[in-house]
Image: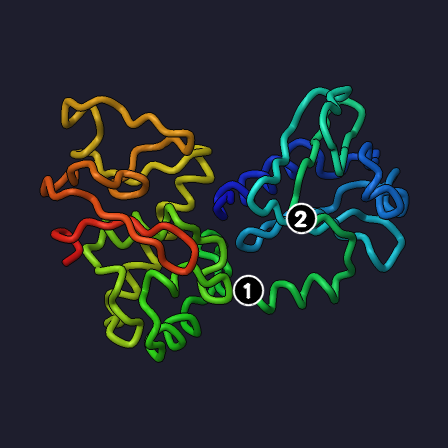
Amino acid sequence: MPEGHVIHRLAREFNSRLRGSELTVTSPQGRFAPEAAEITSHPLRLAEAHGKHLFIDVDAPTPRHIIHIHLGLIGTLRFEGESETRGQVRLHISDGATAANLRGPQWCRLISEVEQAEVIARLGADPIRADADPGPVRVRVQRSGRSIASLLMDQSLFAGVGNIYRAETLFRLGISPFLPGRGLRTAEFTSIWNDLAELMRAGVEAGRIDTVRPEHTPGAMGRAPRRDDHGGEVYAYRRQGLPCLICGTEIQQRAMEGRNLFWCPTCQG
């Protein structure tokens, strides 16, 4: 599932390419056709991301004028050629020169501003957003008996954080993924929040997740670059069975709440 930086990057791309343009909105697959007909031939007002949710606000004179997209596990949203509609395209958005195609999303629906506010109210603070307030999140985390690894994946707390950022931030800060939230010091929470904000904002700019510090890059260590479908240089994520880049201990993997957890038992002991 794409993590929050991917959705923020998509929102930025929509704004830079299509904001203010009159849009042609269609559903080649047909499943979004009635909704597309409500908003086509109107301009894009604003695209924005909250966690893993993308909201595309079309300036149409109808109560429902915001396209709400959640890509889920297999969804893709790509800018392609104007005539490129291969596959099951749920949503096609174009200004006649630039086009975006949505395939296989978990959600694609047309909602009102009230419904958008309700969705956002259920989400936690998004480390990428400048208006995020981590204060209430800290209070909830420090009252919880759940592990910090579990809490970091809770979208009602840390909106947009996924499995990669969870593993990497905890590794970078030397925090055990099994530490209960109520055992987390305020300074540690602040470090987690600041590190997430730094890494995720860098991900928006780069379009990939890189978490290793300069001294641990392939060039600095004389090692081969990481080869993985997810890309990026990381410390723990999907490196199970390999030596830790810092201490040499074998990186561990364990299932936690249906997702794989990765950590170094020495650096995060």
Q: Is residue 264 left or right of residue 43?
A: left
Label 2 close to label 1 by CB (< 8 Å): no
Label 2 to label 1: alpha-carbon separation: 15 Å
Residue to which mark 2 is pinned:
69
Report x, y in % for residue 251: 20, 44
Q: For the residue marked with disc 1, what is the amino acid?
A: Leu
Q: Secondary structure at mark 1?
A: loop
Residue at 76%, 42% in the rendered image: 44
Report x, y in % for residue 91: 76, 37
Q: Is residue 152 at all visible to an observer of this figure?
A: yes
Question: Which mark, residue 123?
Answer: 1
Residue at 66%, 39% in the rendered image: 104
Report x, y in % for residue 233: 30, 33
Report x, y in % for residue 89: 74, 33
Residue at 39%, 65% in the rendered image: 151
Q: Secondary structure at mark 2?
A: strand
- State which quarter of the image contains the C terminus: bottom left
Q: Is residue 22 at all visible to an observer of this figure?
A: no
Residue at 53%, 54% in the rendered image: 51
- Indicate the quadrant where residue 20 lies: top right
